[in-house]
Amino acid sequence: MRKINLPESELPRQWYNILPDLPVPLSPPLHPKTGKPISASDLEAIFPPPLIEQEFSQKTDIEIPEEVLEKYKIWRPTPLYRALNLERYLKTPAKIYFKNEGVSPSGSHKPNTAIAQAYYNKISGTKRLTTETGAGQWGSALAFSCSQFGLECKVFMVRISYEQKPYRRIMMEAWGAECIPSPSSQTEAGRRILEKDPDSPGSLGIAISEAIELAVTDKDTKYALGSVLNHVLLHQTIIGLECKKQLELIGEYPDVIIGCIGGGSNFGGLCLPFVRDKINGKDIDIIAVEPTACPTVTKGEFAYDFGDTACLTPLLPMHTLGHSFVPKPLHAGGLRYHGMAPIISHLVEQGIIKAVAVSQLDTFKAGIIFAKTEGFISAPETNHAISVVIQEAIKAKEEGKEKTILFNWSGHGLLDLSAYNAYLRGELIDFSLSDDEIKEALKEIENLPKPKKR
Ligand SMILES: Cc1ncc(COP(=O)(O)O)c(C=O)c1O
């Protein structure tokens, strides 16, 4: 079968929270000023109470509100595809399945949490949401979601992407949001960066600082984060939960699960329901893929660090390249982040999942193979996953193993054609990052507390 669809009636009605199932608990986030574990009340200035509760919840299954399910039904359940043409092209005995999250209105997995966050803010009395966005996937998802629930939305978009990729800004505006290039002169954090470097290309870390600053200085405004935090990964588990049902329908179970990681949400969303099985004894290889130009997990340090450049967020226990690290202008804008979801970092530290890095040119090579075989043009972020899927399928051929490979097709690339254009004309380059540069970037976290080794 080429495409496995679930009826709307089979849409999962609960998200899966991995926190209570972790064999070793996560280290707590710390208050940026006191260095003590944060309490729920520390987050009240930026998040509404239901999301704070989910961030720390010890309940395994969390009910999805009816209003959220109704919005999910605009595009969910998403189809699970078998990549038969890619299998034939690679002459691999492996079976390759991909979950198509590109069918959402904004074109990626991001609305799975944007809709939930907009809903919980709406019922908590928030009037306006602010956020940051890299290439614009998250900003457009939040703009769409705010429009569904009648909230105002203000998005700080990393300047390099704002200039290179106008179409996502236009999408945000079509859904009624305001989109501002970051660093901007609207916030203290932005002005500080512009003083030092008026031509700053921006980074997710800077844009987060700007968005948080607006939230803490206006009582009607809250902040929404598109990845990294526990509640974001929780909402994204709808992907893996649907996928399990779809695979069950055809009597399949994955041997290998692959996804790209920027902050860890699409990968976590797909793999966490399967990580639960792995913790209970299933043998699955679970592989996260990041860019060599922003090798947070493969080359960064597992340490406490801020989620943003201006040090406004709590200290999170995660893999990091240091909160001032500004990655080179990769086309996979959503993977240009210095940190990682604490849940994903923790699972890597515990040896339950692993991470690998691939270069920009290799990812586009893989994306073109995928486009020519399966037809879909993938987001540059998604091409990272596809590159490793191809490696794994070739490995299965060499080993003569009939493995089942599952990956998250996290978004389409129809608004990233300038990147494809550069690749096809031989103008795209690989960015190198030396060990010395990484060492230098990590210096700024030397004096921050370290998570306990467990
Ligand atoms: C299509 C797509 N895939 C992946 C990512 C990476 O984010 P995350 O690791 O949170 O899934 C992004 C982020 O913008 C994205 O737009």
Image (spheres, grey):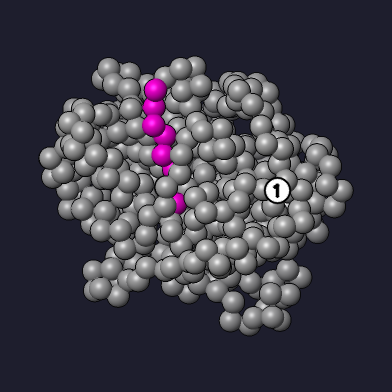
Vertical arrangement, residue 214 with respect to residue 58, above or below: below
Q: Is residue 289 magenta?
A: yes
Q: Residue at x 71, y 37 (%)?
A: 452
Amino acid carrying label 1: it is Tyr
Q: Quadrant of the N terminus?
A: top left
Residue holding disc 1: 304
**Quick one: 430 or 314, which is closer to the camera?**
430
Residue drawn at point x = 16 percent, y = 43 percent: 90
Question: What secondary structure characterizes most of the magenta part?
Answer: strand
Part of the protein shown in magenta: 283-290
Residue 75 appears in the figure: no
Q: Where residue 70 appears, x then y in whole percent? A: 49, 31
Q: Answer above or below: position of 391 versus 441.
A: above
What secondary structure is found at the residue carrying circle 1?
strand
Please give the name of the residue rendered at 31% of the width and 63% of the height, measured from the top-left corner: 361
Look at the picture and state if 113 lies above or below 361: above
Mark 1 lies within 8 Å of ligand 1 (Cβ measured)? no
Q: Nearer the viewer, residue 128 or 345?
A: 345
Few, some or many residues within 10 Å of mark 1 (<14, 14–19, 20+): many
Q: Is residue 302 left or right of residue 373?
A: right
Q: Is residue 19 left or right of residue 75?
A: right
Q: Residue furthest front?
A: 436
